[in-house]
Amino acid sequence: MGLYHNRPTVADFRALKGKRQLTMLYVETLDEAAAAAAAGIDMLSIIAPLWTPQMRDAAGDCFVQVGLLYGQLITTEDYQRAAHAAMQTGGDCVYCASSFGTIKALADDGIPVVSHAGLIPSKATWTGGFRAVGKTAVSAMQVMEHVKTLEEIGCFGVELEVVPDRVALEISKRTTLVLLGMGAGPYADAQYLFAEDVLGYTDGHKPRHAKTYRNFAAEFARLQQERIAAFQEFRSDVAGGLYPAKSNSVDIADAELERFIQMLKT
């Protein structure tokens, strides 16, 4: 991928801290990435298995965080290899929720790293499951200490998930990290949602902090019925001898056909 581009940089986002909020979306398809770029979304989150040169092109000038999947990568070397591969494909930073040692190793390699604090889905059992974190003074201090550790080991940003808004405000005052808020109120440096929630095709539970702007689920259901109908019509046409019609077939001149038949007889 090209080294030179017009996308925003880590330095740009750091300079914007406290000046304007960024917008961020988790996307999974080329269409979603392209739509986000056309809409002027600042940042995208795309997991490493979906990160391709085609996705980089679709994302346009969006700053892209490539998610290194916890549990699929194990050792620090695994994460380092995956992170460098993501950056070579045009990633702007990586997301890593592994150990502090692994995160530090990535940062020491000069790779911009975003980690996670508050409700961390892959580690939710330690904080009581899928619920808000930081609702007591002790819990809020634990989130603060986690954020400060991430800052000390070299992260430039942190996903702050399902934390009380006033706790997020106090944390933001005390860290240089870019806070990517998901259910963390209006004081984070970025507002982060999943495209499936924004577009209204979430399968299963929709989190409290999500906001839906369109009903793609109904449209997808309509399109599926149209698929079924089209396939049924195709099946019916074949059974009834209506497909293929002459217009769907390749013809041969009569003389050439006759010559071919004569050749078959020799």
Image (spheres, rainbow, N blue to C red):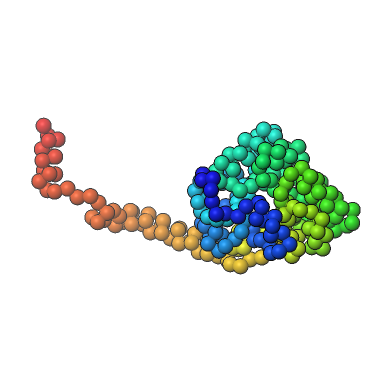
**Which quadrant holds the C terminus?**
top left
Residue at 77 percent of width and 50 percent of height: 117
Residue 245: give x, y in percent of width and height. 26, 56
Q: In this rendering, does residue 241 appear at all?
A: no
Depth order, front residue of 14/252:
14
**Which quadrant of the structure image shows residue 207?**
bottom right
Residue at 74 percent of width and 44 percent of height: 154
Q: In this rendering, does residue 252 appear at all?
A: yes
- Where 72 sits versus 184, above or below? above
Count the labels in the image.
0
Residue at 12 percent of width and 35 percent of height: 263
Residue 177: give x, y in percent of width and height. 74, 52
**Which quadrant of the structure image shows residue 196?**
bottom right
Q: Residue furthest right?
A: 138
Depth order, front residue of 84/161:
84
Horizontally, is 132 left or right of 247 in the view?
A: right
Residue 249: give x, y in percent of width and height. 25, 51
- Where 116 sits versus 189, above or below? above
Residue 24: give x, y in percent of width and height. 64, 58
Horizontally, is 145 left or right of 75 in the view?
A: right
- Where 185 sits versus 27, above or below? below
Residue at 60 percent of width and 55 percent of height: 8
Depth order, front residue of 229/210:
210
Horizontally, is 102 left or right of 244 in the view?
A: right
